[in-house]
Image: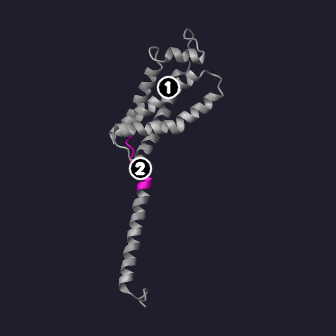
Amino acid sequence: MLDRSTNPAFHSILTKKCLLDKELNKAYSQSRNMIPVNLTAVVVSAVAAMGVGFLWYSETVFGKRWMRLEGLDKNKPDKSGMAGKFGLMFATTLISAYILSLFIHYAGATGWILGAKTGLWAWLGFVMPAGLGNHLFSRKPFELFLVQTGHHLTGLLVIGAVLGAWR
């Protein structure tokens, strides 16, 4: 019977395997910790999504309907703290865009269509169920949920399309 402990070929193969395992583990660790995120694309996609929001809630699209469903009086708008509210909204949109860029990376999505699909899946899996859960107990019309979640869907589609196109 062949004794593996004294066989030089066995030691050579074992040494090469250990070195290869070490290099693979190092490469895996680095790739796991350093996900490439294009911050320019993240900012541009967040700005685009904010643009979608301004259009979505304009009077010509869903603004009037949204105000009516929310029970707001368009003749008495509360404009206090709007700069802070829009600043916080932009910050949360940046966070969404950054996280969606990670999803797109993990999905291996390239091109605007696959980026938009990743946005769709993020909306379907996280945003829509959470929004519906909140809405069910709000005693507000279901149409309000559709307007609000439609805005989130459109925003994530735009963010995903921009990020996917940039890859």
Q: Residues within 10 Å of mark 2 (few under 14, many from 20)?
A: few
Front residue of 156 and 47: 156
Residue 23 numbered tag: none
Write the residue at 40% across / 77% down. 14
How are the residues colored? one colour
> Which corner quadrant holds the C terminus?
top left
Write the residue at 41% across / 38% down. 117
Q: Name the residue that disc number 1 marks.
A: 86
Q: Position of residue 99 (x, y in %)?
A: 47, 41
Q: Position of residue 57 (x, y in %)?
A: 48, 20
Left or right of 43 in this view: 86: right
Image vertical order of residue 134 relative to residue 24, above or below: above
Image vertical order of residue 93 relative to residue 144, above or below: below
Q: Residues within 10 Å of mark 1 (few under 14, many from 20)?
A: few
Image vertical order of residue 27 relative to residue 149, above or below: below
Front residue of 28 and 62: 62
Q: Residue 139 in magenta?
A: no
Write the residue at 50% across / 36% down. 124
> Which corner quadrant holds the N terminus?
bottom left
The span picked out in magenta is 31-41
Q: Could you tell me if residue 77 is visible in this image? A: yes
Mark 2 belongs to which amino acid?
A: Ile
Q: Position of residue 103 (x, y in %)?
A: 44, 44
Q: Could you tell me if residue 95 is visible in this image? A: no
Which of the two marks, 2 or 1, is nearer to us in this view? 2
Write the residue at 58% across / 35% down. 130
Q: Name the residue that disc number 2 marks.
A: 35
Q: Secondary structure at mark 1?
A: helix
